[in-house]
Amino acid sequence: MLRTFKHFFFALLGVFALHVTLAQDQEGFISIDCGRPYNSSYTEKKTQLIYVPDTNLIDSGESHSILSEYKDDYQQQLWYLRSFPQGIRNCYKINNIRNGTKYLIRASFLYGNYDGQDTAPGFDLYLGSNFWDSIKLKDAANSLEKEIIHVLVQNYLHVCLVNRGFGTPIISAIELRPLNLSYYKAQTGSLALVNRFDTGSDNPYRYPYDVHDRFWYLYNSNDNWLNISTSLPVESDDDTFQLPSDVMSTAVTPKRANDPLEFWLPDDDNTTQYYVYMHFAEVQKLQPNESREFTVSHDGELFKPRSPDYLQSTTVYSSTGLTGGQLFKISKTANSTLPPILNAFEVYAVKEFLQSETLDRDADAMTKLKSSYGIKKNSWQGDPCTRGYLWDGLNCSYAGYDPPTIIYLNLSSSGLTGEIPHFISNLSNIQILDLSNNSFTGIVPEFLSWLPELTALHLEKNNFTGSLPVGLLQKSKDGLLSISMDENQDPCAMSLSCKKKKNKINNFVIPIVASVGGIFVLLLTASAIRWGLKRKQRDTKSLSQNGPLESVKRQFTYNEIAEITNNFDKSIGKGSFGTVYRGKLGNTQVAVKMLSESSVQGYREFLTEVQLLMRVHHRNLTSLVGYCNAETSLGLMYEYMAKGNLQEVLSGKSTSETLNWEDRLRITMEAAQGLEYLHYGCRPPIIHRDVKTTNILLDKYMLAKLSDFGISKTFPTDTRTHMTTEVVGTPGYLDPEYYRSYRLNEKSDVYSFGVVMLEIITGRPPFLHKFQEKIHISDWVTFMLERGDMTSIVDARLEGNFDTSSAWKAMEIAMNCVSSKPTQRPTMNQVVAELKECLATRNDNAHTESRENSIELSPSAR
């Protein structure tokens, strides 16, 4: 929205001269000063907002200062800008954003004649992979800003500027402000700001007056409107909008009592949908014989009368999208002695962002590749698979609204060195991989054979040594994979002859070793435990030479692990595998799982977890930091989860505070997303087999992550509906059908997740002891549901502070998950989709009893 910010910020100078208070809580705020040449944050004097430079958020563009003659008119974040004279598309990547959060996202632009050309540019603005808006600056003196209310689905955000040939793109500031999910809801899409006006006021407002840092602009009232106001504060008990008192203390009313207040929606081609929010508060103390009542109408539709309370905010808003060109009229009723009023109003246009960004694990692999090798390609910015702006050397597959995946990667002649990075194994849909004409060294890694879709692998003109992995050779032999290995330094890397020669030697050596080894075992094995230990040591050595551990993050020696854990002085958990210790790696806290020397079963689980964690990467799965692969000491190092496991939090063992209903729903969703990723984001799919509340960990921000993959199992992707395997898992969470039939499929995890949901909702364990009997939680809930009393089911420690509608929805999901027949259980895709509806239900009904002041616009009964 274009307007004269010169007047805006001159007015702010006067307002903030009042020295209101210290800045309010800025938790979740992200404020970026684009192009600022100083690599340090600062506090903006007028708003007390903390801004950071954009240095680490983009690797292109040039820093410039606007001319000094314009600086006095604007706050500090607009004094500098970043211009992009090179490349068609240049993108910011803003990290550490919580996905699922609704944000007000604002991009600000001020030309300020920085280049002395006095020609303001025009260009396009993108949010992620989707077009947001066109930017056309009016002149050097007027700034322009674009705002959108958008729910982020990743934990990062791309903001991109695209050169359309109308001048060099520039940007001055990017700001993100978290909002409650119940704010500003559209049936579909995101909401781009068209207008936000404070009527009847002489001053514009933003933070700290508005806790969400919404900009309230001055409305140029027509000659038929009269400004009215109060010096008393106006309350906003309604948590839905949290309107600023200073905005709501002024209003307009028609000069002639019988006239309506009118405003129009933008007139366009009727393809854009609009949402309107009108804010009211009575600012005059009415006498006993006075009344103010009015109706709101648009396009001939009349809505029921409203009478705003004195010094109390109320909001009337459209619940569905409206077409452009409509006239809104606020008219007094026949019973009213006073004309209508309007304190503020907002208009938003729906923006449909239909293109998903690249699948998380693919995008993560490309980001790591770019960072690890310092690749400086102009096109390697923003989302890798954005249509029309693909990264150079990539091709992607698109399937409807699903995230695109990378199927072709050409890194030939890119000057890459060292060993092939393990994160390339994340590109599970890659079909053609070209790494030729670089300086890669070492052996060709085994993980390349794990790429299920790979059909062509170009490794020629590198410095590889040794033979190709057996898996790659077998795929080549079966005609499934074409491999090019010409012109490598080691002849063994270019031919099968060395492999064959080694096999002849091994045919001679292995029987001798086996015989000696057999005698050795007979002499030393006094018990089954010692035999198991010997096997573990032997397998460990083999794994370190040929297996996946060499491809995982960072390897630590036993002495380093001992130093990190302060000689294992703080145990934070135990299991069949051994003990978990708390440690510190630099300034980062970690958890170290050390394998017990006598644990044969634990060792198998250890190997399973290593192999799985190598190829799974998701925000809601615990992350591997490193490992210890000593001769007799094996350990895994994870990110430290400060809040412990979910069972401890639910039971109150780790905290005295009761987990509130909103956090329970969010944690349920996050755990579901982690499990959904295992089932549908991995190839082949993975069945966890031990989903329970103790295996759901919480970090310091209460972000939930699924953990403990020691008994997880990959699931075939052909037409088979199940696999037959031994029964493992935890009583109470174990699928009874799997227990009876030994038939395992992803619905076994769904059952376990249903038990977890019941535990979260009720605060009760999987087994309840009633009248000297052990009753499963699902049976108890079934009995209680027949009584229809949700209050008796939901955790009593909530003291009734939960949303009934979302509780019923969550209970419905949970009970479907624990259906006795697997075919009647939903998939985790369906569970996640239904949980999103559940969260929406909770947000729709949040603070229902206190929302008399937030009125949904709906036609009156006729």
Image (cartoon, grey):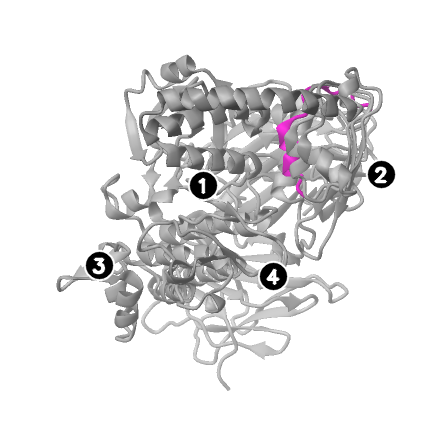
| Residue 551 in view in this figure | yes
Q: Nearer the viewer, residue 43 or 786?
A: 786
- In the image, farthest residue toward the left: 771
Residue that carries the numbered disc 4 in the rendered image: 188
Q: Nearer the viewer, mark 1 or mark 3?
A: 1
Give the SS element for disc 2.
Answer: strand
Q: Residues within 10 Å of mark 2 (few under 14, many from 20)?
A: few
Q: In this orientation, which residue lies closer to the viewer: 534 or 424?
A: 534
Quadrant position of residue 487: top right
Q: Which is closer to the viewer, label 1 or label 2?
A: 1
Q: Which numbered tag is attached to residue 166?
A: 2
The CA distance from mark 3 to mark 4 is 43 Å
Residue bounds of the magenta highlight: 413-428
Q: Residue under circle 3? A: 768
The CA span between labels 1 and 3 is: 27 Å
Q: Nearer the viewer, residue 140 or 764?
A: 764
| Mark identifier at residue 611 | none
**Picture residue at 40% right of the left edge, 52% below the top:** 727
Crowdedness of circle 3 by 10 Å Cα count: few (<14), some, many (20+)?
Answer: some
How much space separates mark 1 and mark 4, taking CA atoms? 37 Å
Of the two numbered discs 3 and 4 in the rendering, the one whose residue sits closer to the viewer:
3
User: Which circle's residue, 1 or 2, is located before the other in the chain?
Assistant: 2
Q: Which residue is mark 1?
A: 709
Residue 652 included in the magenta stretch of the image: no
Coordinates of residue 625 in the picture (x, y in percent): 48, 27
